[in-house]
Image: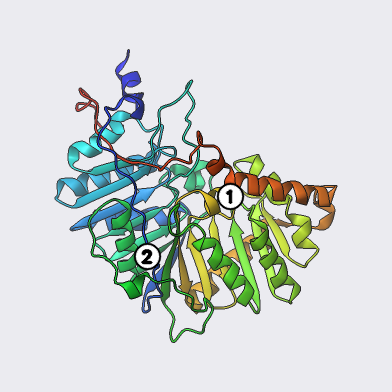
């Protein structure tokens, strides 16, 4: 077997290390004021800012991502993490076992050899050459540096988030956060990677029921919200439903994979019916055709109530952002489909800042006006009632099927430290 072939043998041949369950977090984080939040659009804005922060790290790096590829972006990130670990920065990297399942052993070993604490979320061996761990994925994209600066959004560490990748380059968003809210993101990231943290007090643990659209005393308010398979399975969906009920003037949602349940669809429809300007920006050139077909099942139901729907056709849309009125926005990893709303581990930040809201609105308005095709009822599928019925049944089947089928992902996902196979220490970065 060639050295290249040996290097491509990834997690399937790694000796079984101690296994622990991911931390179930019984915390709901509140609004934190006086933050600086900057929108980062696509890899051209995101990667330089993240890489610069990582290069300047002095004490700690926490990074988790769904996808990391061995391309020009992944290789640069790998070298930055290696350099940080070598200069004494405590560096913890959590990768999803499905999204990062093709990484070579040599690529991973180079990081652990330098001192990077590397762990894989729910890895599984291939069956007949096919990855089997499809569901309940670690879908978050979070970076926290020295507990003082955080990045969160939908952008993975891969070259397909850069325009020079070609027609398949993704349109996406993330944010950089500095200020008091970073402490909450840092606390959450520490819990997820199994590091000991100071427990939240009881008044910080209770459910927060304040109005999401209450007028803020000042801009720069940020709140972390997340979805897990423990105490917080519907938090992100509940936030969307609440702000839609409270919306008065405008709603703009740009989401890559749009196939929400009926309750969320109803809130979108109801907002439009009471006169709110509701716009959806969805995929017109999807990386997966099923995403477009599923979304179109909802079009007639929404369009006839006054919702404006645009399909982005320049390249695949990968964003997960929304804004309501002139103050509230959200950016994160959660799509509005069964996987994100019911199965995957997700994290968004909610932002109450008029300047940020205006900037995001301007970016999305340019997208819808100049790069999208407006949908109308005459392009929706025929047999409309039948398609809506099928869509409703498919959504709820997908939502509950993993719990019904014990051989699918009804198990508790594992967080598994990466241990290089014997004899792989000489494999350098690729």
Q: Residue 338 carries which label?
A: 1
Q: Where is residue 283 in the image (x, y as percent from the top left)?
A: 64, 50
Q: In this view, does 46 lie to the left or right of 6?
A: right
Nearest the eye: 44 or 328:
328
Q: Residue 195: tell me if it is visible.
A: yes
Judge the density around disc 2: few (<14), some (14-19), many (≥20) Cα neighbours within 10 Å. many
Tell me the distance, in whole angstroms, between the alpha carbons under discs 2 and 1. 23 Å
Outermost residue on the bottom side: it is: 217
- How far across and how far down the image is residue 155, in percent? 45, 52
What crowding class fits label 1: few (fewer than 14 Cα within 10 Å), some (14-19), or many (20 or more)? many
Q: Nearer the viewer, residue 1 or 95?
A: 95
Q: For mark 2, give the secondary structure.
A: loop
Q: How is the image coloured?
A: rainbow
Q: Sequence order check: which comes first, mark 2 or mark 1?
A: 2
Which quadrant holds the C terminus? top left
Dividing the picture into quarters, in which one does residue 375 lie?
bottom right
Side of 399 where 153 appears, left or right: left
Comparing labels 2 and 1, the label whose residue is closer to the camera: 2
Residue at the image point whose x is 63% and y is 74% from the top:
245
Residue 118 appears at what percent x and percent y? Answer: 27, 42
Q: Which dot marks residue 27?
A: 2
Q: Quadrant of the N terminus?
A: top left
Q: Is residue 171 visible?
A: no
């Amino acid at each position: 077997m060639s050295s290249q072939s040996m290097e491509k043998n990834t997690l399937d041949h790694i000796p079984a290390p101690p296994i622990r369950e991911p931390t179930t977090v019984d915390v709901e984080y509140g609004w934190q004021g006086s933050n600086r939040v900057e929108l980062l659009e696509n890899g051209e804005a995101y990667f330089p800012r993240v890489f610069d922060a990582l290069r300047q790290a002095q004490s700690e790096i926490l990074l988790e991502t769904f996808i990391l590829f061995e391309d020009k972006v992944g290789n640069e990130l790998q070298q930055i993490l290696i350099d940080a670990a070598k200069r004494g920065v405590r560096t913890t990297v959590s990768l999803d076992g499905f999204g990062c399942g093709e990484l070579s052993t040599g690529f991973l070993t180079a990081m652990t050899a330098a001192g990077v604490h590397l762990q894989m979320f729910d890895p599984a061996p291939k069956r007949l050459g096919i990855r089997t761990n499809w569901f309940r994925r670690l879908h978050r994209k979070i970076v926290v540096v020295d507990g003082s600066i955080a990045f969160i959004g939908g952008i993975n560490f891969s070259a397909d988030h850069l325009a020079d990748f070609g027609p398949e380059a993704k349109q996406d968003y993330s944010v950089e956060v500095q200020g008091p809210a970073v402490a909450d993101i840092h606390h959450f990231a520490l819990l997820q990677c199994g590091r000991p943290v100071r427990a939240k007090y009881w008044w910080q643990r209770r459910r927060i029921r304040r109005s999401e659209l209450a007028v803020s005393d000042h801009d720069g308010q940020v709140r972390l919200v997340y979805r897990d398979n423990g105490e917080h399975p519907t938090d992100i969906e509940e936030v969307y439903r609440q702000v839609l009920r409270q919306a008065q003037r405008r709603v703009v949602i740009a989401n890559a994979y749009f196939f929400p349940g009926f309750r969320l669809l109803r809130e979108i429809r109801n907002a439009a019916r009471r006169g709110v300007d509701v716009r959806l920006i969805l995929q017109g050139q999807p990386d997966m055709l099923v995403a477009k077909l599923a979304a179109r099942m909802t079009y007639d139901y929404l369009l006839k109530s006054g919702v404006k729907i645009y399909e982005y056709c320049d390249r695949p849309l990968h964003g997960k952002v929304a804004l309501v009125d002139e103050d509230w926005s959200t950016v994160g990893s959660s799509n509005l489909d069964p996987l994100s709303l019911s199965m995957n581990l997700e994290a968004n930040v909610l932002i109450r800042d008029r300047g940020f809201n205006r900037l995001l609105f301007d970016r999305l308005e340019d997208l819808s006006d100049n790069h999208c095709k407006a949908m109308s009822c005459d392009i929706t599928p025929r047999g409309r009632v039948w398609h809506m019925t099928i869509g409703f049944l498919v959504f709820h089947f997908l939502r509950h099927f993993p719990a019904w089928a014990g051989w699918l992902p009804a198990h508790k996902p594992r967080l598994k430290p990466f241990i290089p196979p014997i004899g792989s220490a000489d494999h350098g970065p690729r």
